[in-house]
Amino acid sequence: MGPESARRKAYYAGPGNRFWDVLHAVGLTPRRLEPSEYLELLSYGIGLTDMVKTRAALDADLSPGDNDPAALRRKLEQFTPRTLAFNGKHAARVFLARNVEYGKQPERVGETTVFVLPSTSGAARRYWNVAYWQELTRFA
C-alpha cells in the first residue's frame, strides 16, 4: 500500500491511480467506487490484500525483506479464490520468484489462476494496456 493509501486507510487512494476507474470501465464493478468504499468489492466477489503488511511505501522504496509471499500463499490456500490478479509486475515477480509478463500465468496456486496486470498507478502509465484487464474480466 502506498503512503497516500495508508494515510487515507483505503486501497488505491493515491492521486493519479486509475484502479477504481479501471474496475468500472472493464465491468468488474457496476459503478465507479471511491477508495473509501473498498469493502464493497467483497459484494462483487473481489478481495484486496498486500504482499507487504509491515509498512506503507512505493514499490521502488521497498526492500526484498518487506514482501511476504509465504503469507499470501497461505491466504490463497485458506480462501481458495478462483483468481489472483497482481496490479503490476513487482509483487508478481516476488511472489512467483521469476520474471513475469502481463496476462494469465502458466502456473496456478492450488485452484487459483494467476494474472499479472499493468499497474494502475500514475507512475506506470507508459506501460498501460487495458487489454489485460479485459482478459481478466472475461475470465472472471
Image: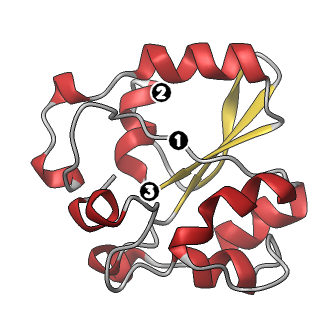
Task: Tell me the CA gap for discs 3 and 2.
Answer: 13 Å
Q: CA distance from mark 1 to mark 2?
A: 16 Å
Q: Which mark is residue 96?
A: 2
- Name the residue type under label 2: Leu
Q: Of helix, strand and loop, which one carries label 3?
A: loop
Kind of residue at badge 1 = Thr
Q: How many marks?
A: 3
User: Which amino acid type is shown beneath numbered disc 3?
Assistant: Gly
- Eye-nearest disc, 1 or 3: 1
In which quadrant of the rendered view does residue 121 lie?
bottom left
Residue 16 in view here: yes
User: Which x, y percent locates residue 8?
Assistant: 34, 66
Can you give x and y, in whole percent of width and height, for residue 120 in the image? Answer: 46, 72
Residue 22 versus residue 98 in the image, above or below: below
Up/down of 70 relative to 132, above or below: above
Left/right placement of residue 18 relative to residue 58 reads: right
Q: Is residue 57 above or below residue 31?
A: above
Residue 122 located left or right of residue 48: left
Label 2's element? Answer: helix
In the picture, which quadrant includes the C terminus?
bottom right
**Residue position for label 1:** 49
Relative image position of residue 13 (x, y in whole percent): 40, 72
* Element class at badge 1: loop
Res 88 label: 3
In the displayed structure image, the side of residue 140 where residue 113 appears, left or right: left
Task: Tell whether label 2 touches label 1 (CB within 8 Å).
Answer: no
Going from the N terminus, do you reach mark 1 or mark 2 first? 1
Q: Residues within 10 Å of mark 3 (few under 14, many from 20)?
A: many
